Every structure is written in structure tokens, then in C-alpha cells.
Amino acid sequence: MVRIGLKYALIICFAAQGAQVPASPNTFFWLSNQGWPSEKGIPASPATIPAIYNFNTQGSSSLYIWARPEMGLTLKNWSLDLLSTNSSVLNFTSSTVFGAGVTGVNRWQNLGQPTGNSTSIQSIAGFTITSGSGLGIGPATKTSDAYYNPTTDAWLLARVDYTLQPFSSLTSTDLYLRIGSFGMTNSSGTTSDVDVVFGHSSETSLNAKTQRQMISSVRDAVLHYYPRPDADFDGDMDADGRDFLIWQRNFTNVGPKNNSQGNANVGSTAGLDMLVNHIDLAAWQFQYGMTVNPTLQAVPEPGSWLLAAGFAAAVLTIRRRMPSKKLIRGPSASVYAVSIDREGVGIP
């Protein structure tokens, strides 16, 4: 068995993303597990919203809020809430607003960086009251803002940290962004001029004056738990390139396949199967480089191994080489995440 060398671990996967969104009279906000420079841009449909998958040994991690102001306008003031629909899954612990985006100049004069609880974190905000004290985000800041991503025409706005609660059965929670109680303003107008789209680009817009603290009709992200796998397919007490080659040679949706053939979640109960597929690749990505404790037994708890369609894209795009991976530093020095991009290939 592979030892979970880190106290906590996380796989985050994303579904494949569609084409870039055309110019719109709306201001967009969306969630991601990635900060600059890996963000792939606003999800194009409900099917491409972030799907976040956690092992039952997960402890803490972060979400990032990205924004794209209405075309040609500068977002000067904003406030957002982030909600979880299942209070037994996580606790929002802290937030960080990226306020000094431009060298020597603040984006916002005042920052709202609240703590939260098991259901919400409210009034994450950036505001400028005194003229000239904050540039906001918009066309004039594209070339100088350290948190602007020209590939996706998006600005990294804030990070929200959370811890996951202990659990004993399969569970999940939907995540929603909403307009905060302070509303929003553009540089050329009033609060009522800002129409906001959360999550994916085809969602119905909400007005920053009349529809504050209302959630969208479709969730903006979903977070799942699922069981800890075993990706040490050759039994040599680690997960390495040789284990990947075993998975690659045996990849098929035709079973039965056992652990030595590349199946990381062998079994017939909920969350397990007898196949070698994209789920087992995800397990290998997570456990790559970890060593084994021969006395450690897998946690026999049920979980969901039904991953998003993005992993199907991953299987189709795999080359005859070991996929690369990227370790993203989490809010705690002992927490890392293995990131899979929306095309399903490890980020170099």
C-alpha cells in the first residue's frame, strides 16, 4: 500500500473547457483551484464548472476568485459572499484580497478579508472611497497589474482558505458566489449599472443593486469526497514512473482488472470498480512520489469515484510519456495539491 506521507492530500480536477467568451455587457466572477498563471478562464457552460475531489484524509486547501469586468469599464468597488450548501463538509477559515496588483499603486483603498464558518464567508471586498486612492481592475491596468492574466483576460481577485471536516461516508457540497451586501460599482456609473454573472458564462446575470445576496440558479463549483486509492501497482513501496507504465499498458474500460494491472480502486462496493481507467490515472497523479508503509491499510469507507468529464479528455490526450505534475503550495506549509488542468493533462 502507498503511504499517505502528507497528513492531508487533495486532487482537484476540472472538466474540459470550451472556447473563450465573447465580449459581454456583464461583469464575470468565477471560482478556481488555481491562481496565476494556470487559470484556464471562465467556465463556458454548467458542465465545465470546477469539480473538486477530496480524499477522506484531506485537511485544508484554497479556492481562488477570478473576475472579468464589463468590456471597456473598470471595476472600482465590489463585495462578494461564498456559500456552501452542506455545513458538514467544510469551514471557511480566512480570505485574502489581492489589493496591491499594480506596482506602487493599490487596486483598492479598503479591503474586506473576513473569516467564515461552515456555511459561508461574507463581504469579501475591495473598495475605494477617496478618489485616486485605488485603480480598480480594468483596461488601464492590464499592462501593469501583477494579477492580470492576458491569456484569459481575467484578474485574480481573492483567495479563500478552508478546512475540511472529518467524515465517515460519501458526501459533497455545492459552492455559490453571490453579490455581497455592499454591492458593486464601475468607474463610470453607479451600483445599479453592474450586472454580474457567476460561475459559467451562460448563466443569467444578477443586478448589483436589486439582487444582492441572491445566488445563481446553477452552482458555481462542487466539492466531493472519495476514498483513498492505492497507485503502487508494482508493489515496490512507492508510486513512480513504473506504476504509470503499468496503468498505461492496461488502460481499458473492459474488466476485471486488479491492482497489479493498474486498478487503484479495486472492489465492487460504492466508489470502487474492476476497471483500469481515468480514475486510476488520477490516483497515480495524486500519489506520485509518495512512499509506502507496509502496515498501513486502506480506509474502508465508501466514496465516489465518478469524476468529471474532464478526465475522459485526459485519457484521450495522454502521450507515450509520463505526464507532468505541479505542486501548488497550500495555505499551510504541510499541504500541497496535485493539479490537473481542464484538458486533463498534468500542468508542467
Image (tube, grey):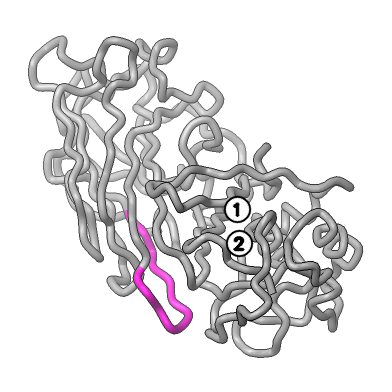
Measuring 64% from the left and 72% from the top, which residue is drawn there?
293
Is label 2 in a helix, a strand or a loop?
loop
Q: Which of marks 2 and 1 is nearer the N terminus?
A: 1
Residue at numbered disc 2: 308
Where is the N terminus found, in terms of image quarters?
A: bottom right
Q: How many marks?
A: 2
Measuring 85% from the left and 58% from the top, which residue is drawn there?
242
Residue 277 in the image: x percent, y percent?
77, 67
Q: Answer yes or no: is residue 202 visible.
A: no
Q: Is residue 72 magenta?
A: no
Rendered position, 161 above or below 128 = below
Question: Of the numbered discs in the image, which one, if any, rests on residue 310?
Answer: none
Rendered position, 231 above or below 67 = below
Q: Does the magenta stretch include residue 171?
A: yes
In the image shown, does 185 or 281 lie closer to the viewer?
A: 281
Quarter of the image for residue 96 reads top left
Residue 24 in the image: x percent, y percent?
42, 30
308 sits to left or right of 66: right
Badge 1: how crowded within 10 Å, few (<14), some, or many (20+)?
A: many
Q: Answer yes or no: is residue 110 visible.
A: yes
170 sits to left or right of 181: right
Measuring 53% from the left and 85% from the top, which residue is drawn there?
301
Quarter of the image for residue 296 reads bottom right
Residue at numbered disc 1: 15
Residue 282 in the image: x percent, y percent?
67, 60
Q: Give the range drawn in magenta.
A: 165-176
Q: Which amino acid does label 2 sit on?
A: Ala
Are the residues flagged by discs 2 and 1 in contact, CB closer than 8 Å? yes
In three-dimensional space, the C-alpha distance between marks 2 and 1, rounded to whole angstroms, equals 6 Å
Q: What residue type is labelled 1?
A: Ala
Measuring 60% from the left and 62% from the top, which residue is drawn there?
308
